[in-house]
Image (tube, coloured by chain):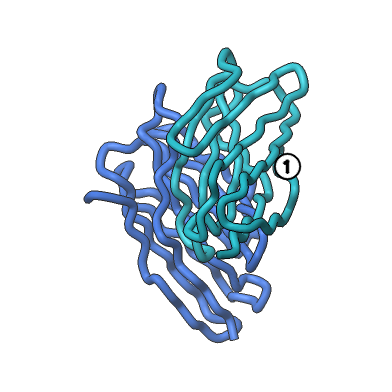
Chain colours: A blue, B cyan
Amino acid sequence: GAGVSQSPSNKVTEKGKDVELRCDPISGHTALYWYRQSLGQGLEFLIYFQGNSAPDKSGLPSDRFSAERTGGSVSTLTIQRTQQEDSAVYLCASSPGQGAPEAFFGQGTRLTVV
Amino acid sequence: SQQGEEDPQALSIQEGENATMNCSYKTSINNLQWYRQNSGRGLVHLILIRSNEREKHSGRLRVTLDTSKKSSSLLITASRAADTASYFCATRAGNNRKLIWGLGTSLAVNP
């Protein structure tokens, strides 16, 4: 596609439910990032995929969070047993990878846990 | 934890004035990038400066890099109300392609 696409754009869920957030990166981009941003705050790194390498999961806040990237393209971020503190905007970005530093962002998914 | 730190955290100026934001980082870098974010959604890349560059211009944007002080500044000249946004710096170091982000500067340009 022309840009990074995230779905849904908004998600309201009840505390304790599981949610899945989807990211479609730019075709051919080997690097994919997930970030979380709370209101008025900076970007909190969650996870980083680069090609076929093992993902860098060092930013995942708890074992309720997981992410996968199938076929080196689409990625899904799953949050199990959501809590109110999980409410935030979840941003996905992709990058061409080798020798290409610029990251391209999707518009994010605004998650509200009630 | 974030490597980059921007200051000020918030800046309010009048239209036509210049806005200067600073970013500091902790380790050696390959390059430093500045991004803009409107309304808490996706970020847009503005400009990149490599570690062997000291200054770079793009339209009304001027970026400087001082590797000895591990700091960068972003200057927006002749600001406009449409420049109101949050501005973030990001660094990439060594073979680690992961971007490290600062906490951002919230800029308000008043008409």
Quarter occupied by the C terminus of chain B: bottom right
B66 lies above or below A94: above
Pick out the residue farthest to the left.
Answer: A1
Disc 1: which residue: B5
**Which kind of residue does numbered mark 1 sit on?**
Glu
Q: Neighbour class for label 1 at 10 Å: few (<14), some, many (≥20)?
A: many
- Direction from residue A54 to residue A8 in the image, left or right: left
Residue in front for this viewpoint, A69 or A41: A41
Residue A61 showing in the rendered view? no
| Coordinates of residue B7 in the picture (x, y in percent) | 74, 45
Residue at image x 68%, y 73%? A85
- Direction from residue B80 to residue A74 in the image, left or right: left
When asked about the image quadrant of residue A50, the answer is top left
Residue in front for this viewpoint, B35 or A62: B35
| Coordinates of residue B30 in the picture (x, y in percent) | 57, 20
| Coordinates of residue A80 in the picture (x, y in percent) | 55, 70
- Direction from residue B34 to residue A99 in the image, left or right: left
Residue at image x 43%, y 52%? A68
Residue at image x 29%, y 50%? A3
Residue in front for this viewpoint, A62 or B93: B93
- Tag 1 secondary structure: strand
When asked about the image quadrant of residue B89, the answer is top right
Pick out the residue farthest to the front.
Answer: B16
A6 lies above or below B70: below
| Coordinates of residue A16 in the picture (x, y in percent) | 59, 81
